[in-house]
Image (tube, rainbow, N blue to C red):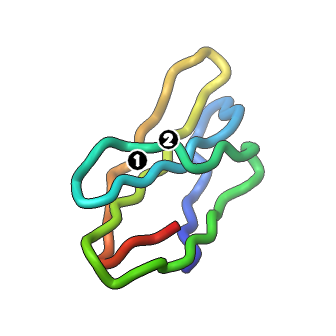
Amino acid sequence: MVITWKAPAGDVTGYKVETRSNMGDWNVVSEVSPTTLSAEFAKGSEDGSTSFRVTAVYADGSLGVAKAFGFAGQFE
């Protein structure tokens, strides 16, 4: 599965791609460049659920956290 996002306005220096399993803690699974606007995941099992979100990191150190979304199953 591939998730994609649109670049926000402003001086973005990169993105943090985060997941959480079964409503647990958020984990950064990838930090990508400002030109990368997608991330790929593989479904590891049908059990539980996985939520995803992308955080934009700006040059001034501020963060823009996108709304989370999720799917049934465990993704890696």
Q: In this image, 24 relative to 64: left or right?
A: left
Quarter of the image containing the N terminus? bottom right
Q: Earlier in the sequence, mark 2 or mark 1?
A: 2
Q: Tell me what residue is drawn at x 55 percent, y 38 percent.
A: 56
Can you give x and y, in whole percent of width and height, for residue 67 in the image? 33, 51
Who is closer to the viewer here, 74 or 5?
74
Q: Tell me what residue is drawn at x 22 percent, y 53 percent.
A: 23
The amino acid beneath tag 1 is Ala
Can you give x and y, in whole percent of width and height, for residue 2 in the image? 58, 75
Label annotation for residue 37: none
The correct choice, above or below, for 18 with respect to 69 in the image is above
Disc 1 crowd, CA 10 A, few/some/many (<14, 14-19, 20+): few
The correct choice, above or below, for 70 with respect to 43 in the image is above
Alpha-carbon span between mark 2 and mark 1: 6 Å
The correct choice, above or below, for 76 with respect to 21 in the image is below
Can you give x and y, in whole percent of width and height, for residue 47 in the image? 28, 78
Who is closer to the viewer here, 44 or 56?
44
Q: Tell me what residue is drawn at x 62 percent, y 70 percent.
A: 40
Q: Tell me what residue is drawn at x 47 percent, y 49 percent.
A: 18
Instruction: Say which residue label 1 marks.
Output: 66
Instruction: Say which residue label 2 marks.
Output: 55
Q: In this image, 62 relative to 67: left or right?
A: right
Under tag 2, what secondary structure?
A: strand
Q: In this image, 57 relative to 22: left or right?
A: right
Under tag 1, what secondary structure?
A: loop
Q: In the rendered structure, are the residues bearing label 2 and label 1 in contact, judged by CB atoms less than 8 Å apart?
A: yes
Can you give x and y, in whole percent of width and height, for residue 41 in the image? 57, 71
> Which residue occupies the extreme top position in the image?
60
> Which residue occupies the extreme bottom position in the image?
46
The amino acid beneath tag 2 is Thr
